[in-house]
Structures are given as C-alpha cells and as structure tokens.
Image (cartoon, helix red, strand yellow):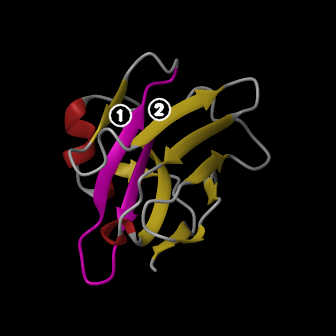
Amino acid sequence: EVQLQASGGGSVQPGGSLRLSCVAPGGSLDDYAIAWFRQSPGKEREGISCISTTGGSVYYSDSVKGRFTLSRDNLEKTVYLQMSSLKSEDTAVYYCVKPKTNFCVPRTLRRPFDDMEYWGKGTLVTVSS
C-alpha cells in the first residue's frame, strides 16, 4: 500500500522557517495531486495547501497564505512545503496526502480527511519561544 512520507519538522522560534518534504518511499508521487493537512492538539485536521500533478495549480488556506509556499520537483520526486514567518498557532502534526479525486482545487482544502488517502505518520512542527 502506498504511504506518503512527510519529513522536515522540528522546533523553531516564532518568525522562523522550516521546509517540509513529502516523498513516496519506493515509488513516485509524480502522478499524484498532493495536499497538506495539519492537526493541532485538540483541533480538527485542517487542509492548508494543495498542488496539482503538474504544479500548475496551487492553493492555500487563509491561515497560511502569504507565509507558506508549496512546490514540487518531479525529477526529485518530492513535494516541498516552505513555511516562513511561523507562528505558535502553526504548531501541529503535518501530513502530506493524496486527494482521492487526484484533483487540487480550492475546495480540496475544505474536504474531510476521509476524502484523502495514502497519508503516513506526519511530521511534528513546534513553534515556540
């Protein structure tokens, strides 16, 4: 079964930056639209960004727009989430997932997590002074 692997999390101070990566170990995510969801303690999972298979379409939630940048390098078989100007409320476990529809459109970020597939364990981002 395919599992997408998110990595790159860690601890950072407010205002800092981190870059998360998403790969498909043993395979390729070239043909997948990829979305990032996150879950903070005591909160529902939140869709924050998605990118189409070609990288031509990228969407962000209002909570991260202007601070996060999602990109993909299909030669490297990796999707990157560059996070800047991090805030304490960005503290969460971040998951990269594939929408079951394999589309990235604005409403993808509002879909329930059950409409996603191939998620792995996620990577923890902690923003704290």
In this figure, which residue is indicated by the disc labeled 1? 101
Q: Are marks 2 and 1 in contact (CB under 8 Å)?
A: yes
Residue that appears at 26% across and 44% down: 109
Residue at image coords 64%, 56%: 5
Which amino acid, by three-letter code, is at mark 1? Thr
Between the C-alphas of marks 2 and 1, the distance is 9 Å
Label 1: few (<14), some or many (≥20) within 10 Å? few
Quadrant in which the N terminus is drawn: bottom right
Q: Position of residue 23 (x, y in %)?
A: 67, 46
Q: Secondary structure at mark 2?
A: loop
Identify the magenta region: 34-53
Q: Main secondary structure of the magenta part?
A: strand
Q: Which residue is at the front of the view, 72 or 85? A: 85
Residue 3: in sight, yes or no? no
Any magenta on residue 81?
Answer: no
Question: What type is the residue that disc 2 sits on?
Answer: Ala
> What residue is disc 2 on?
33
